[in-house]
Amino acid sequence: MKLSRSAALVAGGVVLGLVVGGTATAVAVSQAKAVKVCVTKSGVVRAADAKGKCPKATKKRAIAVRGPVGARGAQGVRGPAGTPAAIHAWSTSAASVLVDDYDEDIATLTLPAGSYVLSASVDIENWGLPSGYQGGISVVSCRIPGYETASIYLSPNGTYIGEPESFSLDSTFVHAGGPVTLECNRVWNSAMVRKASFVATKVGGVN
């Protein structure tokens, strides 16, 4: 079937161009699979009347709005293996650190400038004598940049090796670069950090 150049299908609406009496007209078409048109023997498209009937000397034809689905294409070539994930994190640990003074350094990390998530854990116990101040009770606190614990009371239980306590510290902070320290502070009597860990993960450093 030959169609006039003015008959056009435009995807989106769809719009069908018709030549009626030498004048191009446009008719909006729904998203149906085909649209009915009236075609002369010479292939000129004519408009139907208000009742949808074709004029004399024309025949009704169906024009596909959307063609059939094409065959599935061949599978593409497998891409190269990706690079392993990189995590920009620093960690350190400590053991058997006596807290016998104010601002005792437990563990230190040296970090480049950036934003960080800090996480530390501490296992600590009393290291005071029952005959000492306040019955040998140890009172300590620990801190990292952005977070400090409340005072922690450790009972001596009549020996040097006293009541143990475990706790964690977490914070986020923006660092200008340089050392970052986990510290513990003696308030009353000495305490012993049996073990500690300190981790810094750079924000945006996991990819």
Image (tube, grey):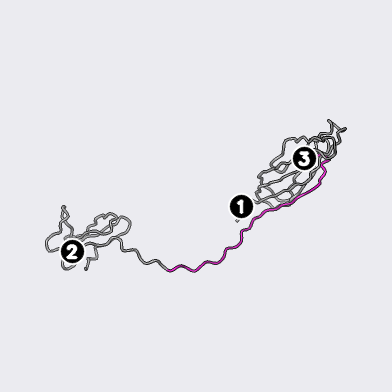
Query: Regarding mark 3 in the picture, which secondary structure is present there?
Result: strand
Q: What residue is disc 1 on? A: 204
- Residue 39 marker: 2
Q: What residue is disc 3 on? A: 164
Residue 25: percent from the left, percent from the top? 22, 57
Q: In this view of the protein, which residue sits in the foreground, 42 or 6?
A: 42
Nearer to us of marks 1 and 3 is 3
| Residue drawn 15% across the image and 53% down it | 51
Query: Regarding mark 2 in the picture, which secondary structure is present there?
Result: strand
* Disc 2 residue crowd, few under 14, some 14–19, many 20+, Cα 10 Å: many
The three-letter code of the residue at mark 1 reads Gly
- As measured in the structure, the alpha-carbon distance from the residue carrying label 1 to the one carrying label 3 is 36 Å
| Residue drawn 69% across the image and 46% down it | 119
Q: Do the residues bearing badges 1 and 3 touch, measured as CB atoms within 8 Å?
A: no
The three-letter code of the residue at mark 2 reads Val
| Residue drawn 72% across the image and 38% down it | 149
| Left or right: residue 46 compared with residue 129 | left
Q: Quadrant of the N terminus?
A: bottom left
Which callout, 1 or 2, points at the residue further toward the start of the chain? Answer: 2
* Disc 1 residue crowd, few under 14, some 14–19, many 20+, Cα 10 Å: few
Q: Do the residues bearing badges 2 and 3 touch, measured as CB atoms within 8 Å?
A: no
Residue 135 higher or lower than 74, as above or below: above
Residue 91: percent from the left, percent from the top? 71, 52
- As measured in the structure, the alpha-carbon distance from the residue carrying label 2 to the one carrying label 3 is 96 Å
Residue 202 higher or lower than 130, as above or below: below
Residue 168: percent from the left, percent from the top? 70, 42
Residues shaded magenta: 74-102
| Left or right: residue 101 compared with residue 9 | right
Residue sitting at the far right: 131
As for residue 65 lying within the magenta part, the answer is: no
